[in-house]
């Protein structure tokens, strides 16, 4: 009997990398929260092996594609892979109203304010650092402190202190929100950093704990752990070099349509919060109960009579041109805005009801360096971070406008 003969013909040689996984990107992992991640890992395409075998008169063709095996292995790896990169939106806020309700016996002022998150914000990219000793912060604008005085670094240090974790980060801050604007951009950055650090550590802390801890490094930070709209009460706290508000944050649900447009106008000059409080006089403040303002907004939405900011008169003393800017916007709007008011301690003027600034902002040389941005109200869902709107419409009237 003739012995059967066999021949093997290989169309391609098996790729030398078939026994090891080669990623073109890092593992993807989606924690709780809205964020953007690197795309799902892709692997270098491996040529499959085609083998023809002949035994007597029968021919058998065997096709072996190692991609399937590699992808199956990668799926198993991804199940255990930790978070390595995370990009989050860090939105700012406006104060729809801000009331100074009195002065305490200890000399501090009591405050009550309706805070609301808006669609203007920064983008912060976090990457795990191989270092176990130091965070590294970079940004797209000059003048932003990159050391431990930055609230982002303070937040990361605070999280490690509270949880005992040893994660350090490379952080890049893509800055859009100007400072000295009364928009809480730095506070939002700190809250976002706390949220990110918690994601990298497998959510060791609850949102409530993050909110409570955050008050140790800044007064407005706890607000950003609300649903995006909150009634905040508390008192101002002063030290030799710092003034902030010790807050109680109460989530609220108001019938304010999230698609109401607004425009933000901020001159190059900033308002010092400490200087604004030095010029505050209680006889100049409103006497309207903050709860009444909330009720009016719930019933009639936002209007000029509810957008009261008791820090406007002292801020206008510190920066008289800011008062003139507000007056000109109101005079030129001709009903274009439902309300025009200052946010926080300044120096941003907000126009609710239209995304467009008055024409004089473009025509008058005095305002060639102002910061301009359209925005809208946003909130966040439970157990998720804020999501960047599809289009924020932010614009800058001058490339020289500081966004420190």
Image (tube, rainbow, N blue to C red):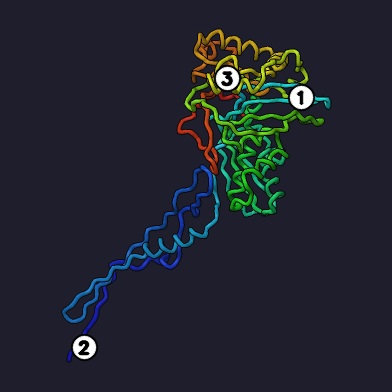
**The N terminus lies in which quarter of the figure?**
bottom left
Rate crowding at label 2 as few (under 14), some (14 to 19) or many (20 or more) other CA atoms within 10 Å.
Answer: few
Q: Residue at x 61, y 52 (%)?
A: 201
Q: Check contact, mark 3 vs mark 1: CB within 8 A.
A: no
Q: Bin the neighbour count of mark 1 within 10 Å (Cα to Cα): few under 14, some 14-19, many 20 and up.
A: some
Q: Residue 109's mark? A: 1
Q: Position of residue 366 (x, y in %)?
A: 60, 12
Residue for badge 2: 3
Q: Distance from label 3 to label 2 (Cα)?
A: 98 Å
User: Nearer the N terminus, badge 3 or badge 1?
Assistant: 1
Q: Secondary structure at mark 3?
A: helix
- Give the labeled residue for mark 3: 296
Q: Position of residue 152 (x, y in %)?
A: 65, 40
Calculate the distance from the C-alpha at mark 3 to the C-alpha at mark 1: 24 Å
- Which dot, 3 or 1, sits closer to the camera? 3
Q: Going by the image, does 157 lie left or right of 199?
A: right
In the figure, 135 relative to 349: above or below? below
Q: From this viewpoint, which residue is outermost toward the bottom?
A: 1
């Amino acid at each position: 009997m003739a012995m059967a003969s066999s021949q093997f013909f290989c169309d391609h040689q098996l790729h030398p990398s078939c026994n090891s996984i080669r990623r073109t990107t890092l593992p993807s992992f989606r924690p709780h929260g809205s964020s953007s991640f690197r795309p799902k890992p892709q692997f270098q395409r491996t040529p499959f092996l085609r083998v023809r075998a002949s035994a007597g008169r029968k021919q058998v063709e065997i096709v072996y594609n190692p991609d399937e095996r590699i992808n199956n292995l990668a799926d198993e790896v991804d199940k255990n892979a930790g978070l390595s990169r995370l990009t989050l939106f860090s939105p700012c806020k406006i104060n729809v109203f801000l009331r100074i309700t009195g002065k305490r016996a200890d000399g501090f002022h009591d405050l009550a304010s309706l805070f609301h998150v808006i669609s203007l914000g920064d983008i912060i990219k976090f990457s795990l650092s191989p270092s176990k000793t130091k965070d590294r912060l970079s940004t797209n604008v000059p003048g932003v402190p990159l050391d431990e005085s930055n609230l982002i670094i303070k937040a990361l240090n605070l999280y490690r202190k509270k949880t005992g974790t040893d994660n350090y980060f490379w952080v890049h801050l893509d800055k859009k929100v100007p400072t000295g604007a009364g928009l809480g951009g730095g506070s939002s950055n700190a809250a976002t950093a706390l949220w990110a650090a918690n994601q990298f550590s497998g959510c060791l802390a609850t949102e409530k704990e993050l909110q409570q801890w955050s008050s140790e490094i800044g007064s407005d930070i706890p607000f950003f752990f609300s649903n995006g709209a909150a009634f905040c009460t508390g008192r101002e706290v002063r030290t030799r070099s710092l003034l902030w508000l010790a807050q109680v944050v109460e989530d609220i649900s108001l019938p304010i349509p999230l698609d109401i447009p607004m425009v933000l106008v901020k001159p190059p000059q900033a308002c010092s919060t400490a200087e604004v409080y030095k010029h505050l006089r209680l006889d100049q403040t409103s006497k309207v109960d903050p709860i009444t303002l909330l009720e009016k907004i719930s019933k009639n939405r936002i209007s000029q009579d509810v957008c009261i900011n008791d820090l406007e008169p002292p801020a206008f003393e510190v920066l008289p041109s800011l008062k003139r800017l507000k007056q000109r916007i109101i005079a030129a709007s001709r009903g274009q805005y439902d309300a025009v008011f200052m946010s926080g301690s300044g120096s941003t003027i907000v126009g609710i009801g239209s995304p467009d600034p008055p024409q004089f902002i473009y025509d008058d040389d005095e305002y060639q360096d102002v910061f301009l941005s359209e925005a809208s109200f946003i909130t966040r869902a439970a157990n998720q971070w804020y999501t960047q709107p599809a289009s924020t419409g932010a614009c800058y009237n001058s490339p020289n406008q500081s966004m420190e």
